[in-house]
Image (cartoon, rainbow, N blue to C red):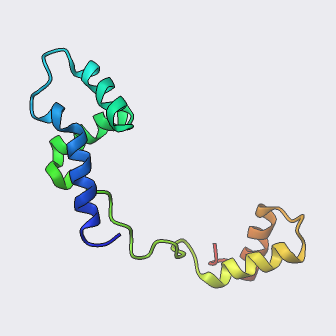
Amino acid sequence: MDEDGPIEVALHRYAVIAPLVEGAVPPGGQAKTLRQLAAAHDVAPRTRLRWLARFRSGGLQGLRPPTRRQDAGSLKAFDRKWLDEAVRLREEEPRRSTATIIALLERLDPDCA
């Protein structure tokens, strides 16, 4: 997503919930308005309520999509060498259970898991 992407998403989400935010909804008419907006924008009423809550708690910033972690997709729980070893053990004997593979790894190095 480029730099303007998250703000464009937030603005689109605001446009979808604007009637609820700007007080254009008569008292007791929120459910009806949500259904009408859902039909017009193809977004579920629950999603609209979630966006409304996020807007009320964080303003336009609250409507931005979460940023992707820089380390997304990388191993965090254990060293890559242990994953490679687990894969090797599974390929060596495909019928080995995960518990057996973990036990084998722990025998190789008790600190691996």
Q: Is residue 29 left or right of residue 84?
A: left
Q: How many marks?
A: 0
Q: Is residue 48 left or right of residue 96?
A: left
Name the foreground residue: 71 vs 47. 47
Residue 10 percent across, percent down from the top left? 24, 53
Name the foreground residue: 99 vs 63. 63
Q: Is residue 40 left or right of residue 88?
A: left
- Depicted 17 relative to depicted 6: above or below: above
**Which residue appears at 22% of the width and 60% of the height?**
7
- Depicted 43 relative to depicted 103: above or below: above
Quarter of the view holding residue 44: top left
**Which residue appears at 9% of the width and 34% of the height?**
22
**Which residue appears at 27% of the width and 19% of the height?**
32
- Depicted 105 relative to depicted 95: above or below: below
Name the foreground residue: 70 vs 14. 14
Q: Which residue lies most toward the top here?
A: 28
Residue 73 percent across, percent down from the top left? 52, 72
Q: Which residue lies most toward the front here?
A: 40
Quarter of the view holding residue 75: bottom right
Residue 20 percent across, percent down from the top left? 17, 31
Q: Which residue lies most toward the left here?
A: 23
Quarter of the view holding residue 40: top left
Q: Quadrant of the N terminus?
A: bottom left
Q: Which residue lies most toward the bottom here?
A: 81
Q: Is residue 45 visible to the viewer in this orientation of the structure?
A: no
Q: Quadrant of the C terminus?
A: bottom right
**Which residue appears at 29% of the width and 34% of the height?**
49
Q: Is residue 72 visible to the viewer in this orientation of the structure?
A: yes
